[in-house]
Image (cartoon, rainbow, N blue to C red):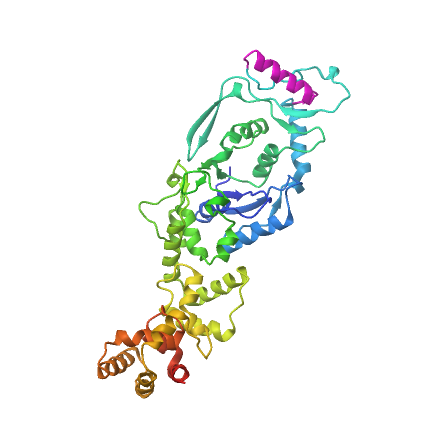
Amino acid sequence: MSDQVVTRFAPSPTGFLHIGGARTALFNWLYARGRGGKFLLRIEDTDRERSTPEATEAILKGMEWLGLDHDGEVISQFARADRHAEVAHQLLAEGKAYKCFSTQEEIAAFRDQARAEGKSTLFRSPWRDADPATHPDAPFVIRIKAPQDGVTVIRDRVQGDVTIRNDQLDDMILLRSDGTPVYMLAVVVDDHDMGVTHVIRGDDHLNNAARQMMIYEAMGWDVPVWAHIPLIHGPDGKKLSKRHGALGAQEYQAMGYPAAGMRNYLARLGWSHGDDEFFTDEQALEWFDLDGIGKSPARFDLKKLENLCGQHIAIMDVAALRHEIEAYLAAANLPPLTEKQGDDLQRAMYCLKDRARTFPELLEKAHFVLQSRPIVPDEKAAKALASVSDGILNELTPHVQNASWTRDGLEEALNAFAEAQGMKFGKLAGPLRAVLAGRAVTPSVFDMMLVLGREETLARLSDAVK
């Protein structure tokens, strides 16, 4: 086996990139990228009925949003069917597989009889050791000759050693009677040909590993390192599904979660590094290993996701944040920002990004800088505005005009004005929020004034007095 780590993500294109699939992709990406290895992408599109180009597109877009770049071309499993069949025929030629002519009816009858006699219903083909001279001219499948005694041990980096008695394994079909390869064969041949060294996938595939090892061993190929990771459950402890709000990766983008927060959250679902909850991509790449993956299912928790997302928004570079917000608006089919709005948003970011957990929350706080005059106050803001007289706002105007336009200068001027009116500044803050933003909940009045500038602030004051 080569020294370079090679992992793969191999989704079936029958729907969007589910959050469990996104986590599997992330684990494979972190493991390979953190070791200077390769991360490959294979689309398991052999189920022609259910595979769609739209689903493939959704998987690629979901991975792009999450920043999980792959090496080389995307591999189509269906396109490699001839190679899969070639391996089945090689095993047949070497006597490690055989032609089985048993019909569906014969297999069903065998199982009924075994059940009636209280024996194992595992099908034992009468053709396994038959003389080829006795073969009829009839359709056949190709089956592998499974070992019939002893045990198969799956050495798993997450589950530990899992032992399966070989008398529990049937002679698995490799090629169907129409000559098409089965999924189990395709996976092994693809993983071998792609040089995959580590297979990191959901533990619902654990039983498949024993059957897939029969092919590796029959072909004399190196068995990859197995790591079967527990599935994700909903808050109620049941397997994660749509009713838990478990959507496709892209839908989380359209809901306004930042990709870095999602990566951090998914990495922590089932894997841990000490007590660290919040970490950067650099830290995840340095720390991630298979030993940190737990054996029990992780629980999906939206509150935790939002909390981590808020921490990532707070540390994000302002230009990158603007770029990601623009991508969010496109994903959510919302109107794009104009260039001026984008520039204004970027300037205001310092007073917006500390307490927003999602992009919609951040944009709501940015309402004051994204709106153009005249500002129409909402119901709560209008009430606050009604609590002071126009006279007071009129008198405030020259004080704002003459203030030095720094945070300290503005605080000094407004506090002095409030005091002269015999009131605390807090009494003035609500009406000023209404004037500047048309909202009752906003960033601080001083931050809004600094971002808007003297001219715009005075214009909004003058609108309110009119």
Q: Nearer the viewer, residue 113 or 148?
A: 113
Q: Is residue 271 visible?
A: yes
The reply to whether residue 67 is in sight is: no
* Residue under the image location 51 percent in, 43 percent down: 6
Residue drawn at x 65%, y 17% is: 109
Residue 321 covered by magenta stretch:
no
The residue range painted magenta reads 98-119
Residue 117's place in the image compared with 422, above or below, is: above
Q: Is residue 147 found left or right of 408 in the rendered image?
A: right
Quadrant where the C terminus is found in the figure: bottom left
Residue 390 in percent (x, y) is at 34, 83
Residue at the right extreme of this rendering: 137
Residue at 61% over, 32% down: 185
Front one among 285 and 245: 245
Q: Position of residue 100 (x, y in %)?
A: 68, 21
Q: Tell whether 402 sits left or right of 320.
A: left
